[in-house]
Image: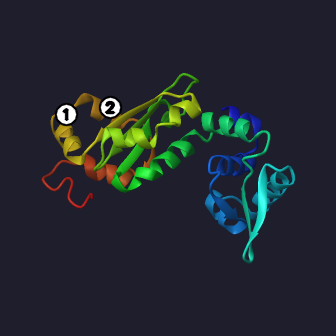
Amino acid sequence: MLGESLFGKVRRKVLATFVLNPERSFYLLELIRFLNCGRGAVQREVSRLSKTGIILRKNIGNQVHYTANTDNLIYRELRSIFSKTTGLIDLLDSDLKSCRDSIGMAFIYGDYARGTASENSPVNLVVIGDTTMDAVRGCTVGFSEETSRDLHITVLKTSELKRRLVSRDRRIREILSDSKIFLSGGQRELQMLSTTGDDLFAGIY
């Protein structure tokens, strides 16, 4: 992918974290845990990016915090690169946070989950929970414009998923058998939803 060609692994992770979360600040140990990368590598990248003005360094109490410099001349270009490439999934995950309470499960399937996406591939999102299509669209309203990717959304209440599984709905079965990237929930929860039985959805909410 473009992001992988332009930046090394650690720098890519550090840059994506800051430019896709401009409202958030991180102290160094928090960032290391968040990225799950080596301390020395993260510290070097943060130091370099701070010196170039791409991220800002500030003292908060006894801690040194870092945040994206949204006034930097190339901030918008960096955000565009990461939102269209390696940071695309992170951006969608961030958008969904505003309606996370009503989402029991969310995952991406299709080309992006399989790692075969092209520039024209849509992002296919499934949301399962006590929410509506309008609510999910409201959370993700800016995603397509910012990433230049079509977002195809499927929203299911757990009762509807059960009904369609029982009726052997072909599309639902194709989605469940496809590769996935989970944004909320995980494979274990999905397996619970995919079993048959009277207590299929007990304790999901």
Q: Do we see residue 149 in this rendering?
A: yes
Residue 144 location (% of width, % of height):
52, 31
- Number of marks: 2
Q: What residue type is labelled 2?
A: Glu
Q: What residue type is labelled 1?
A: Arg
**Residue 6 sits in quarter:** top right
Residue 202 location (% of width, % of height):
20, 59
> Residue placed at 57% from the left, 24% from the top?
118
Residue at the spot of label 2: 174
For disc 1, the neighbor class at 10 Å (few under 14, some 14 to 19, many from 20) is few
**Residue 147 sits in quarter:** top right
Q: Which mark is residue 168?
A: 1
Q: Do we see residue 185 in this rendering?
A: no
Comparing 94 with 139, the one in front is: 139
> Residue placed at 68% from the left, 35% from the top?
81
State whether residue 167 is above or below residue 201: above
